[in-house]
Image (cartoon, rainbow, N blue to C red):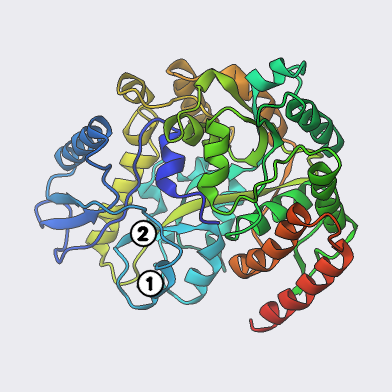
C-alpha cells in the first residue's frame, strides 16, 4: 500500500535513505572502472542526512577501489503509479527497490536477476529472517535481499489517554476496549476524535484489510473474495457504531494517507491503526510531540498485515556490476553501525532514532546488535513502544491480498458508507463489494 514509502520507513531507523543502482560497462570492481548509480539520495532540504549519505559513498568507494558510485535524487524511491511501466519497459536501475506485494510478479516475469550464487557478498544474509528470505526465493533460487519488514499495530496518543482517565501503559487489546477508550477520548469534547479511520483513496480498504486480519478473517481465499464474512461484518459494524452511537470517529471522512496523520499530529485524535513509522511521520512531518505517542499490538491480535521491501537486481547486470551492487547493499543497509544502521550518527544529526521496525534480521546475532545500537542511541522514548514489541512476536503476519489496490478501492465504498450513512446496509455493502472483487480477481 502506498502510504508506506521506503524513505519514510528508513528515517525511523535513523537515516533517510535507500538505494538503487545502474550498472556500467566494466568487468571488475578492482581497477576495471565499474560504475553504479545509486538513487534516492536524501533531499537537499535534509543537509545533514544528505551529507551522511555522501560520506558513506566516499567510504564505500575507498573500500572498493575501481567502483564508482553516482548518487541521484529520486523521491519517492518507489512509486506504485510508475513502477510496473518502468520495469516492464526495461528502464529500471541495476539495483531497485521492490515492495513485498510485487515480489512474485517481478520474479515470475524474470525482471529480477538470480543472485543465488552471490548472496555471500551480503555477509549476514543468513541472519535475515527465514520467512523474509523465503519471499524472495522461488524454486530454490534467490532473487532479492529483504531489507524492511513491518506489521501493523495500534498507534495511540498517551497524553490524550491520561486526559481521558485511561492508562497509557495499558493500551487496548481488543476492539471492544478500543471502542470504550475512543468514546472516553471523544467525550473530552473540543473536537477530540477517539479513533481515526479512512473512507477513501484506497486507504479505507487498506485499513479494512488490517482490521479483518486482526479479527481472524481473510480477504481472499483460493482466488475468491472472502471478506463477506462475520469478521468483515464486524469491522464495518464496529466502525458504524463508533460513528453513530458513540460519536467517537469524528464526522469528517478522511481520504488521503496524510489526512489522518495530520489529525494525529494535531493532538486531537486518540488512536489509529499503523506501523511504527507512523510515530516518526507524525512527529517529523506533522509536528506531533514525540513524548505523546505510543504503539501497541493490533487489537485482538489474530493476525496483522505485514509489509516490507527488498533489493533486486536487473537481469541485464553483468557479473562485475552485480558484485558491486551486492557489496553496496551489504555496506549501506546490512552492517550494524554503518550506513543506515549508524544510529550514533543519526542521533547526532537530529534524526528520530528508536522506533521499532519488526527488524528484518529478527533475533539473529545481527538483529540483536542492530537493536542494541538503536536502543543505546535512541532519541525517542523507546518505553512507549514496548507493548508493540512484545505483541509483534506473537501475531501472525499476513501479506496484502492479490489485486490489493483494486480490492482496497472496492472496499473504500463500504468504509465510507458506514461513516457517512447511519442507515447503511452492511450486508448489502459487503455483498456488492464481494461481487466487484470477484470480477477483479477473475481477471487474473
Give the labeled residue for mark 1: 87
Residue shown at 36%/21% (left/top)?
347
In front here: 106 or 361? 106
Measured as percent of width and height from the top left, residue 160 is found at 67, 21
Residue shown at 17%/51% (left/top)?
70
Measured as percent of width and height from the top left, residue 265 is found at 53, 32
Q: Are marks 2 and 1 in contact (CB under 8 Å)?
A: yes
In the picture, residue 268 is in which quadrant?
top right
In front here: 225 or 235? 235
Measured as percent of width and height from the top left, residue 251 is found at 70, 45
Q: Is residue 147 above or below residue 97?
A: above
In front here: 298 or 156? 156
Q: Is residue 101 above or below residue 369?
A: below
In the image, taking residue 269 as reference, residue 214 lies left or right, namely right
In the picture, residue 190 is in which quadrant?
top right
Measured as percent of width and height from the top left, residue 352 is found at 42, 26
Q: In the displayed orientation, state which residue is furthest to the bottom.
A: 443
Amino acid at each position: 500500500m502506498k502510504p508506506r514509502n521506503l524513505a519514510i520507513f528508513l528515517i525511523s531507523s535513523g537515516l533517510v535513505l535507500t538505494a538503487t543502482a545502474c550498472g556500467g560497462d566494466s568487468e571488475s570492481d578492482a581497477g576495471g572502472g565499474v560504475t553504479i548509480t545509486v538513487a534516492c539520495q536524501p533531499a537537499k532540504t535534509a543537509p545533514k542526512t544528505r551529507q551522511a549519505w555522501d560520506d558513506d559513498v566516499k567510504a564505500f568507494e575507498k573500500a572498493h577501489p575501481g567502483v564508482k558510485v553516482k548518487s541521484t535524487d529520486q523521491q519517492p524511491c518507489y512509486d506504485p503509479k510508475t513502477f510496473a511501466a518502468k520495469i516492464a519497459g526495461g528502464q529500471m536501475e541495476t539495483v531497485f527497490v521492490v515492495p513485498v506485494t510485487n515480489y512474485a510478479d517481478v520474479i515470475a516475469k524474470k525482471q529480477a536477476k538470480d543472485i543465488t550464487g552471490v548472496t555471500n557478498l551480503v555477509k549476514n544474509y543468513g541472519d535475515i529472517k527465514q520467512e523474509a528470505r523465503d519471499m524472495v526465493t522461488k524454486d530454490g533460487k534467490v532473487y532479492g535481499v529483504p531489507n524492511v519488514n513491518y506489521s501493523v499495530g495500534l498507534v495511540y496518543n498517551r497524553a490524550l489517554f491520561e486526559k481521558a482517565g485511561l492508562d497509557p501503559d495499558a493500551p487496548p487489546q481488543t476492539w471492544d476496549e478500543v471502542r470504550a477508550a475512543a468514546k472516553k477520548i471523544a467525550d473530552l469534547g473540543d473536537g477530540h476524535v477517539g479513533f481515526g479511520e479512512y473512507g477513501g483513496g484506497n486507504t479505507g480498504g487498506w485499513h479494512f484489510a488490517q482490521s479483518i486480519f486482526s479479527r481472524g478473517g481473510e480477504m481472499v481465499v483460493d482466488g475468491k473474495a472472502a471478506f463477506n464474512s462475520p469478521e468483515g461484518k464486524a469491522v464495518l459494524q464496529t466502525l458504524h457504531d463508533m460513528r453513530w452511537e458513540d460519536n467517537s470517529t469524528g464526522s469528517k471522512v478522511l481520504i488521503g494517507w496524510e489526512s489522518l496523520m495530520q489529525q494525529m499530529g494535531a493532538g486531537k485524535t486518540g488512536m489509529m491503526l499503523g506501523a511504527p513509522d507512523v510515530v516518526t511521520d507524525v512527529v517529523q512531518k506533522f509536528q506531533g510531540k514525540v513524548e505523546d505517542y505510543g504503539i501497541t499490538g493490533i487489537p485482538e491480535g489474530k493476525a496483522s498485515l505485514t509489509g516490507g521491501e527488498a533489493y533486486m537486481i536487473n537481469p541485464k547486470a553483468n557479473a562485475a556490476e552485480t558484485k558491486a551492487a551486492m557489496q553496496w547493499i551489504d555496506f549501506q543497509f546490512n552492517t550494524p553501525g554503518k550506513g543506515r544502521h549508524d544510529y550514533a550518527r543519526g542521533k547526532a544529526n537530529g534524526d528520530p532514532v528508536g522506533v521499532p521496525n519488526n527488524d528484518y534480521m529478527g533475533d539473529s546475532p545481527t538483529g540483536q546488535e542492530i537493536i542494541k545500537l538503536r536502543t543505546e542511541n535512541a532519541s525517542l522514548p523507546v518505553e512507549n513502544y514496548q507493548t508493540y514489541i512484545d505483541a509483534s512476536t506473537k501475531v501472525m503476519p499476513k501479506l496484502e491480498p492479490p489485486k490489493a489496490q483494486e480490492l482496497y478501492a472496492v472496499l473504500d465504498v463500504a468504509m465510507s458508507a458506514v461513516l457517512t450513512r447511519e442507515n447503511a446496509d452492511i450486508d448489502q455493502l459487503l455483498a456488492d463489494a464481494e461481487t466487484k472483487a470477484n470480477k477483479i480477481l477473475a481477471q487474473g
